[in-house]
Amino acid sequence: MQNRKPSRRDFLAAGVTAAALGFAPRAFAGSHDLTALTLSGAAELLRSGAASPVELTQACLKRIERLNPSVNAYITVTAEQALATAREMEAEQQHGQWRGPLHGIPIAIKDNIDTAGVRTTAASELFKDRVPSEDAEVVRRLKNAGAILLGKLNLHEFAYGGTSVVTYFGPVHNPWALDRVAGGSSGGPAAALAADLCFGSLGTDTAGSVRIPASYCSIAGFKPTYGRVSNRGVIPLSWTLDHVGPMTKTVEDAALMLGVVAGFDEQDPTTADTPVADYLRAMKTPVSKLRLGVPRKLFFEGLDLEVEAAVEEALAVLRKLTASMRDVTLPAVPSAAAVWGPEIYAYHAQWIAATPEKYQPQTRMAIQRSAGSKADAYARAVRDVANARREIRKPFAEVDLLITPTMPTPPGTIEQAQASNNGSGRNTSPFDVFGLPTISIPCGFSSLGLPIGLQISGAPWAESTVLALAHAYEQATHWHTRRPKLG
């Protein structure tokens, strides 16, 4: 009996066992369901032999079947394919083959990222039957690392909005309050993670589309430096501003996923041939010498009082963890809409002219507004972005990281969003323009129990520093351990 491997029942029943194996507290917060594990916790469980890829996949599929009708995070569930891959990963594991921490881990992908043989709709009637023949580069890397694709996740149509209410497949509901928006455009990934319907996901971010839903759903959402992760095989919103990044339950999980998808893609001209760090190791770097900058102008103006209180409390925690904190002023932010408007119109011109009725009315009107874009104005806007990406390096001579609220307010209701199509990217869009690595992590809840997010941004290619501080803050607080109560 001394040499017996722990059974699944043994493992799930004992919190001390979980702690000994290094699992995040969140993994067993009020639930012994396998799906409540973090990605890193699930990987340790697989590594120990206490569970299998098939068991994890079955647990996720069962939970998706039960909860997705109320959350509406998934557009397509690839149950048979997922189970087949799980059996393949299990067979490799039994033969001593281990591809790394994503081996046998069930994940899901935002539905504007191509998946070979699985429809990729961008949440639009226009593409409702579109089935790519090739995987996006990031999907290829995830599959090579042993990840199991559970399906494709709902989003704001063509990623052109911040609520995930405007979608052919119906609004995404926030697991913390089903009448509230999940944020957008990556609302499906954020809701799926908050509801424990997968262990990790990828989103896209052009004006905040990873970080807005991360804030609204109390998860970690990381937009890396522009050029750090390939966009090849992603349905574009703006070639100049689009980023792909991990969305996960914890910072550690984000580091694991980023390590898999980051890196140069010789077929994608937007990627940079810059070395990829060991993000998991870098995440554990001490933060006591870091200098923090707080850009209060714009980012701290007009905040909801509860958001302001939560962020000020977070700043107090960060002061104790780091060397210094000071107010800073950032360079002017050029218009992002002046870039993304002409670029999304260029991509959609053929379809918006031939079949405009296949777009949701809000999306159609937004795209058509850019039909008269002038070449000289667009050229100047792209040049302004390039200049801004150079100028933003200057503040980092005096500070290492920038700290802001992710969103000025908690999530509003779906009914309000349907009436006004609101979804502010005020605090998030500047970091797409600057192209900086930026993460949103949980930092509190409103009196109504609605999530509040904290945003940490670094200099170009400083993903490791961003992750280190985000992880240190996460470990110093308990916000990431809280779970929404679903049926």
Image (cartoon, rainbow, N blue to C red):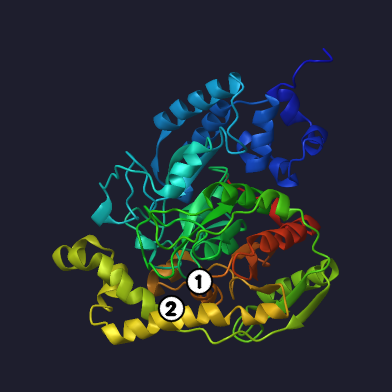
* Image quarter hosting the N terminus: top right
**For the point 54% across and 79% down, which residue is it?**
390
Q: Earlier in the sequence, mark 2 or mark 1?
A: 2
**For the point 36% across and 65% down, which residue is it?**
237
The correct choice, above or below, for 279 with respect to 85 in the image is below
Mark 2 lies on residue: 336
Residues at circles 2 and 1 in contact by the CB criterion of under 8 Å: yes
**For the point 30% across and 56% down, which residue is it?**
124
The amino acid beneath tag 1 is Asp
Where does the image place residue 336, in percent across and percent down from the top left?
Answer: 43, 78
Mark 2 nearby-residue class (10 Å; few <14, some 14–19, many ≥20): many
Mark 1 lies on residue: 432
Please state which of residues 335 and 250 is positioned toward the viewer in this rendering: 335
The correct choice, above or below, for 428 with respect to 173 in the image is below
Please state which of residues 470 and 281 is positioned toward the viewer in this rendering: 281
Measured in 3D between alpha carbons, the distance from the residue under mark 2 to the one under mark 1, in whole angstroms, is 8 Å
The correct choice, above or below, for 413 with respect to 80 in the image is below
Mark 1 nearby-residue class (10 Å; few <14, some 14–19, many ≥20): many
Residue projecting furthest to the top: 1
Tell me the SS state at disc 1. helix
Please state which of residues 467 and 405 is positioned toward the viewer in this rendering: 467
